[in-house]
Image (cartoon, rainbow, N blue to C red):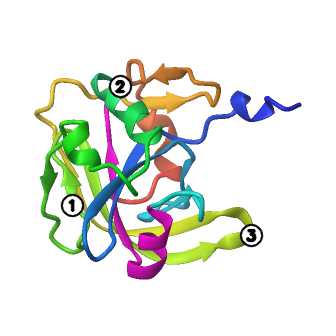
Amino acid sequence: MNQAFTLIEPGPVVLVTTHDGGKDNIMTISWTMVMDFKPVFAITTGAWNHSFAALRKHRECVIAIPTVDLLDQVVGIGTCSGADTDKFSRFGLTPVPAMQVRPPLIKECVANIECQVIDIIERHDIVVLEGVAAYLDTDRKEQRRLHAVGDGTFIVDGRRLDRRKMMATKLPAGV
């Protein structure tokens, strides 16, 4: 039972950028969730994570979606603290100014979503975010996302299977 959480993975591993009023930081989050057919997302993090104080105080972040070629940076970011490490510099990532929030986008990621914190459910260490702007690099050759199993291993997206026609009555307009 102790490893049951490795049987269901939530969503792709993401990098979340924050700004604490003085400097930018990045954290790796492997527990993510889409809340609805709206741009509302949830991540799991709490006071043990250096970036949580910035999320709580400034109530904004960027969800940056890395691809498989960034695996070592993703793991490295998740195994050190922004309290004593400039993660952009250490892991060779490029901060790009966001349009609507203070934390930066990450140039090397395939997608970035600027977000506002709309709720923090402390009992479960869940931060609920609303996307206010999104960017996708469709020219980027590598598009495969990472999924954490929870035991130090990862699964990589494979080929895309299209069933849009079968699901047309269940999809919202514009999707």
Q: Earlier in the sequence, mark 3 or mark 2?
A: 2
Disc marking residue 147 = none
Question: Three-letter amino acid code at disc 1?
Answer: Pro
77 over 117 or under it: above or below: above
Tag 3, which secondary structure? helix
Instruction: Give x and y (percent) for residue 109.
Output: 24, 40
| Helix, strand or loop for disc 1 | loop
Residue 112: tell me if it is visible: yes
**Residue pictured at 32% horizontal, 49% vertical:** 85
> In whole angstroms, how far apart are the C-alphas of marks 1 and 3?
29 Å
- Please name the residue that numbered disc 3 is placed on: 123
Q: Label 2 sits on what residue type? A: Asp
Q: Quadrant of residue 174?
A: bottom left
Q: Pick the residue in front: 44 or 36.
A: 44
Q: Is residue 48 above or below residue 139?
A: below
Image location of residue 20, percent across then percent down: 33, 72
Q: Position of residue 130 (x, y in %)?
A: 42, 70
The residue at which mark 1 appears reads as 104
Q: Are marks 1 and 3 in contact (CB under 8 Å)?
A: no
Q: Which span is picked out in magenta?
A: 51-67
Residue in the image at 16% along x and 37% along y: 138
Q: Quadrant of residue 72?
A: top left
Task: Report the residue marked by disc 2.
Answer: 72
Dot 1 surroundings within 10 Å: few (below 14), some, or many (20 or more)? many
Q: CA distance from mark 1 to mark 2?
A: 21 Å
Residue that appears at 61% across and 64% down: 126
CA gap, disc 3 to disc 2? Answer: 32 Å
- Whether residue 109 appears in this view of the structure is no
Residue 77 occupies quadrant:
top left
Residue 76 forms part of the magenta stretch = no
